[in-house]
Image (tube, grey):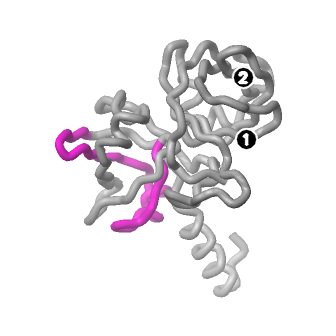
Amino acid sequence: MFTGLVEDIGNVVSLERSAAGARLTIKSGLDGLEIGESISINGACQTVAALWARGFSCDVLAETLRATDLGRLKAGAKVNLERAIPSGGRLGGHMVNGHVDGVGTIVKIARRPFALDVAVEKDIFRYIVSKGSIALNGVSLTIGPDPARGRFEVFIIPHTWENTNLKDLRPGSRVNVEIDILAKYIEAFMRKGRGENS
């Protein structure tokens, strides 16, 4: 479980493809990482598989490469990093599982105030609600008013803009999207209440 509050911006060293997926190696300033712990990389929950002096590696499954933008990362790309919430830690953002629901596309970027206009497919957009929570590249954000026609806006405070990779996005950039888990639970309970199986 994560909060969506980014701790560090890492730099991709390499993405080496294999039959099972890929080995992703990242340079990072995070201290105290341990093999086997969970880490959010651009909002996708991964497991630290190896450590080295200034970073770590993860084994990314083929399904994760399909469902996220991790497979498109190139050497030098900047990625948002967050370690899992420690027991008794503060939940400063919202509950972020690191299970990416899909990929959105940046339509427009505004500055002063900072804002992103994001387009998503209808299977994600149906969960988008005004002033609800959403994670983009693992960053906890609040949806702006009046989302419509497959698009929504998020406003970003200067601290978040300067301390995440959101500032590197351009129109056409792709972002990992995780909708609020509560929306998915509510939908599942309502389906069960109506006697539906899926």
Screen quadrant of the C terminus: bottom right
Residue type highlighted by circle 2: Ser
Q: Is residue 23 above or below residue 145?
A: above
Magenta includes 14?
no
**Residue 168 appears in which quarter of the rendering?**
top left
Q: Residues within 10 Å of mark 1 (few under 14, many from 20)?
A: many
In the image, is 50 to the left or to the right of 116? right
| Residue 57: numbered disc | 2
Q: Residue at x 57, y 69 (%)?
A: 182
| Label total for image | 2
Q: Position of residue 71 (x, y in %)?
A: 60, 26
In the image, is 21 to the left or to the right of 103? right
Q: Residue at x 70, y 37 (%)?
A: 46
Element at badge 2? strand
From this viewpoint, which residue is outermost toward the left? 112
Q: Position of residue 132 (x, y in %)?
A: 41, 66
Q: Position of residue 69 (x, y in %)?
A: 54, 32
Element at badge 1? strand
Q: Position of residue 190 (x, y in %)?
A: 61, 81
Magenta includes 130?
yes
Q: Which residue is mark 1?
A: 38
Between discs 1 and 2, the one toward the N terminus: 1
Disc 1 vs disc 2: Cβ atoms closer than 8 Å? no
Please state the extent of the stretch shown in magenta in the rendering: 108-136
Nearer the observer, 66 or 131 = 131
Q: In whole angstroms, how far apart are the C-alphas of marks 1 and 2?
A: 12 Å
